[in-house]
């Protein structure tokens, strides 16, 4: 399996190249090409992982690879990066977030469907062992009536604002709360943004806490039914990107996306509403 990467500034790319090329832990999958031309960053990645090709433009990967990972930090670039490969029927993993607008996300999904090109995207948090533990422990009490997720996110991030880190708690919250999104409300303080909404029959609250220069809160989840309460702090170890990468490799091998396309849209729907609410607050503290 020959994999190409578009957008290599993201540190997730180091995890991917390390897992597939250095440790050779992904079966027959290898990163064989990077886009973005020769730069110090790409040259180091290529040397570390023995990556065979560096091409100038993303389209230069066509004909060299069997699947593509789009890893630009800013989600606004993801649509333009992914479409050429989806249009050729190639499997594509878009690193978080899928997009910074629902429109861009829908265009990618529609292109994937039109060309029978498997597409996936997710927060790495969605797949880690602590997330699986939270889901399993919560399931013992039945479908949660309420879900509360908290984590760091900077609404003023240069990489798409609340989308960049906000996707992590939202994606996991929605893994626990299936169903259509209704009535997204956004409340702010100097250091926090809180989104509350209904997903299906579950009330969801997501707390985004702005990190300071030296520290940030951990990710944390809580679920409630009438008779149960489950909570879990979610720890990211040195291999936290691997479970999501393995989900992508499974998609390439089987042709079956690990997340339904409707579920790819739901977190973007929430975050788009939050971002719009933040833009409407001209005096928000920064």
Image (cartoon, rainbow, N blue to C red):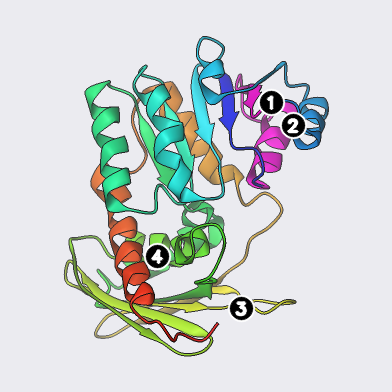
Tell me which residue sits at (53%, 86%) in the image: 191
The residue that disc 1 covers is 37
Of the numbered discs in the image, which one, if any, rests on residue 170? 4
Task: State the quadrant of the N terminus.
Answer: top right
Q: Looking at the picture, how far across and down is residue 159, in whole percent?
A: 54, 57
Whichever of callouts 4 and 1 sits on the residue coming sooner in the sequence is 1
Whichever of callouts 4 and 3 sits on the residue coming sooner in the sequence is 4
Q: Is 26 located above or below residue 11 in the figure?
A: above
**SS at mark 3?**
loop
Q: Is residue 13 magenta?
A: yes
Q: Alpha-carbon neighbours of circle 1 within 10 Å: few (<14), some, or many (≥20)?
A: some
Whichever of callouts 3 and 2 sits on the residue coming sooner in the sequence is 2
- What's the magenta region? 11-36
The residue that disc 3 covers is 217
**Foreground tag (3 vs 2):** 2
**Foreground tag (4 vs 2):** 2
Q: Disc 4 to disc 2, how far (Cα)?
A: 31 Å
Q: Do the residues labelled 4 and 2 touch (CB within 8 Å)?
A: no
- Residue 9 visible in the current orientation: yes
Q: Are marks 2 and 1 in contact (CB under 8 Å)?
A: yes
Whichever of callouts 2 and 1 sits on the residue coming sooner in the sequence is 1
Of the numbered discs in the image, which one, if any, rests on residue 42? 2
């Amino acid at each position: 399996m020959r994999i190409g990467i578009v957008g290599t500034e993201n540190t997730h790319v180091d995890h991917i190249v390390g897992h597939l090329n250095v440790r050779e832990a992904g079966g027959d999958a290898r990163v064989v090409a990077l886009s973005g031309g020769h730069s110090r960053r790409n040259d180091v990645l290529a040397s570390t992982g023995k990556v065979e090709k560096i091409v100038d433009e993303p389209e230069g990967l066509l004909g060299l690879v069997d699947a593509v990972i789009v890893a630009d930090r800013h989600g606004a670039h993801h649509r333009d990066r992914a479409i050429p490969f989806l249009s050729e029927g190639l499997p594509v993993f878009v690193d978080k977030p899928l997009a910074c607008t629902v429109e861009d996300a829908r265009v990618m999904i529609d292109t994937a469907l039109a060309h029978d090109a498997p597409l996936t995207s997710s927060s790495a948090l969605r797949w880690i062992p602590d997330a699986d533990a939270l889901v399993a422990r919560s399931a013992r009490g039945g479908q949660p009536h309420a879900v509360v997720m908290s984590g760091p996110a900077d609404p003023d991030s240069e990489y798409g604002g609340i989308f960049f880190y906000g996707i992590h708690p939202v994606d996991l919250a929605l893994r626990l709360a299936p169903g259509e999104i209704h009535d997204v409300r956004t409340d702010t303080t100097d250091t926090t943004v809180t989104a509350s909404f209904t997903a299906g029959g579950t009330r969801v609250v997501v707390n985004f806490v702005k990190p300071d220069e030296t520290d940030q809160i951990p990710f944390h989840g809580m679920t409630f039914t009438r008779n149960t309460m489950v909570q879990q702090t979610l720890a990211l170890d040195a291999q936290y990107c691997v479970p999501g990468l393995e989900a992508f490799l499974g998609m390439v091998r089987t042709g079956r996306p690990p997340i339904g396309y409707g579920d790819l849209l739901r977190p973007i729907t929430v975050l788009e509403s939050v971002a719009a609410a933040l833009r409407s607050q001209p005096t928000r503290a920064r």
